[in-house]
Amino acid sequence: MSSAHWMASSPPQDTVQETAPGNMPKSSLRLSSLPPIFISESHFKDINELHRLEDDVVETGGLLSYNLHEAKIVLTRVLSKKRITMDLRSKDCYTEEVLVVKDISVADTGTDPAAGHKAKRGKLSGEYEDGKKETEESILHEVSTDSENEDEHKPKNRSTKRKRVASSVEQDPNKAYFSNPYIKVLKWEWFTDSQKQDRVLPIEPYLLYQGQIIDKPEDPKTPGKGSSFTARTKTPQSILERARADAENDTSSPVQQRSNRKLGQIGGGRVSAPFQTTPHSKRAALLHQTTSEHDLGQSSDLPEMPPWVQNDVKYACQRSTPADPPNAAFIAQLDKIKLARLLTGDEIGVRAYSTSIAALAAYPHKLSTGREILLLPGCDAKIANLYVEFANYGKIQEAEDAENNEELKVQKLFYNIWGVGATTARDFYKEKGWRDLDDVVEYGWQTLTRVQQIGVKYYDEFLLPIPRSEVEDIAATIHKHAVKLRDAGIQSLVVGGYRRGKEHCGDVDIILSHPEESKTLNIITDIVASLEQESWITHTLLISTKTSDRGQQTLALNSSSTHGHGFDSLDKALVVWQNPHYIPSTSNPSDSKTKNTNPHRRVDIIISPWKTVGCAVMGWSGGTTFQRDLRRYVRQTYDYKFDSSGVRDRKTGDVVDVDGEAGTMEQAERNVFGALGLEFREPWERCTG
DNA sequence: AGGCGGTACTG
DNA sequence: CAGTACC
DNA sequence: GCCT
């Protein structure tokens, strides 16, 4: 994208040297002869700063305008063209880009926008070789086109204008620009740099966008856009959403369940306001609620609390958490709020909701009152209030709002790209101004990391659930290769969601080990190579061949006589998998080269040395909250540090053997539970989310 | 008022 | 160093 | 958001 290069380049700092601003007491910059100037508020921290800067402009005689239909200059801190046109549109200013071709000799050189666009469509149909960059030429001073309207199929030449601007201007390099009627969006630095140099600098190096104002386009919706990619991405509802929908259709709706409940038990009869409580009044309000319920003679008898509640056992690794708890519908609502916390970057909020959810998921009874929730570890007034709302109305406004929020919807779409986290998803939305995957591909493909490109390429396929049988097939293939590369002593175990019993898995996690320590050394490289060789692995997202810091391990140093260095290596590879065996198209037998349509899968291959394989299995089998709580439990109880490659004493750094002697991975894992003073939990009891 | 899991790779 | 990944 |  030539525009990207162009935009990224900084304005030349050596444009003019002659002025020595030092002896000027006050800026003598005069902007009074320039067209009206509009300042875009985007990226200004607060209104005051904006006003101050507006004052600065006024001080130079600049004609400040608040109407984009009269302003000819827009100063902005935004850099991306997409975002600029969005900003303009938000002020009811619709534009078509007007190209600036400075030098005739470079005009029309391979920047046909339609062609570029088409090429990217091709990528999405799978013809794209990831990793290979689509080299788009960066032509200095030529603004690549892109009509701002959403209509993908509009012929680009209709919306594209090219305007030649005199290049070798004698006196005023801006004259040619200001003699045309187009609106010009400049980097804010044009003004500040001009201030510094006390003269009106040429706008060209700062010109981000030049546009002609057009009428507001009709057809704001464009219902069927014909873009297969866009259509595809919207079709398969995310698993999460479907799970939620299911949960909400739960026949045992809490509304009927608690039909005798009076509305607005907290403080009044209103819907949302009562749930906004001040920190100090929260618990009191709820207690009052339960008291009044008691006074009304309703059954306030709570079921007998499970031992972990009675004993205030607070770590998720200390209790049984099934996959389908009685309060799944309520949990589904909390999950929506949690997702919103995640997307907005509130990691602590995520942690808090995760804790509450894990406790609720472990609770074996259908909830009946808000007071009940207060007894659960990790749950307090906020969650109890949400429950009361849920019990009364069958839904939670905050959750509904989060789910329906357009911004969050788009950010979730981006977040689902492998390699894109919450921060980048927000960046795509807020800074880049992208709204769907087509935008990502069209405007940002080259800025994506390698793995993000792969993530986009297989966006839909990575979201497809993997049946258990296919997980087993994949595991068998990996095991077979491992045996081939070493010997039949290789043991393997599928962990992750599969081991917790999920019917459909998001990915495949498999741990490989071997009772002889030497047999697992460097095997990850060999396995990946071997599977690549047979075309099972199409991409390696990440491979970790070092067990980084473990150099200091006394145990490894002394006991393992096997190797000179002999350290553990809990290696892993995160790869993209595709079954290379496909039916060569029954419908089109003549076509010898039909495409392999088997979906690409995400597969994690983990290698563990035998002596810590119990930790590896344990660390890869539980839900996230189970893992976090396990680590907190181990720290709190023993001041040890747990991770999937072993346990160490935090004070001494010594390795603690929790694996014991075991003949199988499962036995090793049981030993770890025991050594850590934990009751064994079956994998399907670790569904903490 | 401070803490919230621990580790490794990428860019 | 920030961001993302794994559970 | 909850816990210490």
Image (spheres, coloured by chain):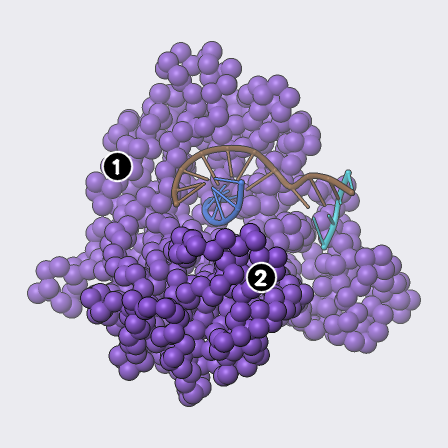
Chain colours: A purple, B brown, C blue, D cyan
Q: Looking at the image, which residue sits at the far left?
A: A590
Mark linked to residue A529: 1
Position in image of residue A88 (x %, y %): 49, 76
Q: Compared to A508, does A277 lie above or below? A: below
| Left or right relative to A631: residue A515 | left
Please name the amino acid that badge 1 sits on.
Answer: Ala
The answer to whether tags 1 and 2 share a subunit is yes
Q: For the residues carrying marks 1 and 2, which lies nearer the camera in this image?
A: 2
| Rendered residue at 61%/23% (across/down) | A649
Dot 2 falls on which chain? A
| Rendered residue at 41%/27% (across/down) | A569
Position in image of residue A255 (x %, y %): 69, 72
Position in image of residue A343 (x %, y %): 56, 58
Alpha carbon of mark 1 to alpha carbon of mark 2: how far? Answer: 66 Å
Looking at the rendered structure, the secondary structure element under dot 2 is: loop
| Rendered residue at 25%/31% (across/down) | A484
- Picture quadrant of residue A395: bottom right
State the quadrant of the N terminus of chain A.
bottom left
Q: Residues within 10 Å of mark 2 (few under 14, many from 20)?
A: some
Q: Which residue carries the number 2 mark?
A: A27
